[in-house]
Amino acid sequence: MDTSDRPTHTPIYGFNAEKASIKKSASMIERLMARLNKKGPLHSTEPDKGFCWISSHRKVGNGYPQIMGPRADGTNALQCTHRVMWEHINGPIPKGLVVMHTCDNRACCNPAHLELGTQADNVHDMMTKGRSRYAKPLSFAELALIQKLRSAGDTIARIAKQSGRSLNTVRNAIRQTPASYQSDLFGPPPLTA
């Protein structure tokens, strides 16, 4: 029997390698790893998780980088790089779950920054971190607290973690003055002396 016609698979590496049943082709994983910048920005809310691994693959309209490669059904298709990395390390993504970025960086492929959740979990995370146009706006009190913490020397990452907001929301709040910020839904601005 000629074995040259059989497809070859790359072994799965990582802490859950024995659970992985989908084996991505060597060329796809190698191509993904070759185009990762492992010195991207520091994790937005948990700096101890390290740097984002930024994929330089082509981004689609929704901002997620994609790579061409084999799917579980054997067909070739464009796939989101963070999902490819998750499957390479952890195995298939269970039906009904999505791979979420804890760092809020769509181009990140660092396995320490990825976790599974439902789409409802993902939307809730987006809303609570202020990454949605429908998210609860900052109150004047929150804005003043963020600015006070920053002027006292706290890092943006620490403020974001304490406030439950994204890095970008905190950065924008630091640049704003209460007069130039959106109208407050929770009462008038605090009096300044």
Image: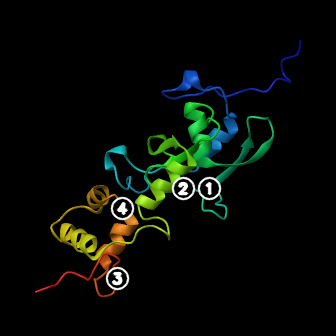
Q: Are marks 1 and 2 in contact (CB under 8 Å)?
A: yes
For disc 3, the neighbor class at 10 Å (few under 14, some 14 to 19, many from 20) is: some
Q: Which residue is mark 4?
A: 165
Question: Could you tell me which residue is drawn at 37 percent across and 63 percent down?
Answer: 167
Q: Amino acid at mark 4?
A: Arg
Q: Which residue is mark 1?
A: 65
Q: Secondary structure at mark 4?
A: loop
Q: Nearer the viewer, mark 4 or mark 2?
A: 4
Residue 166 location in percent, x, y?
39, 61
Farthest residue toward the right? Answer: 1
Q: Which residue is mark 3?
A: 181
Q: Distance between the Cα atoms at labels 2 and 3?
A: 29 Å
Residue situated in front as seen by the camera: 101 or 88 = 101
Q: Nearer the viewer, mark 4 or mark 1?
A: 4
Q: Secondary structure at mark 3?
A: loop
Residue 34 seen in the current view: no
Residue 134 seen in the current view: yes
Colour scheme in use: rainbow
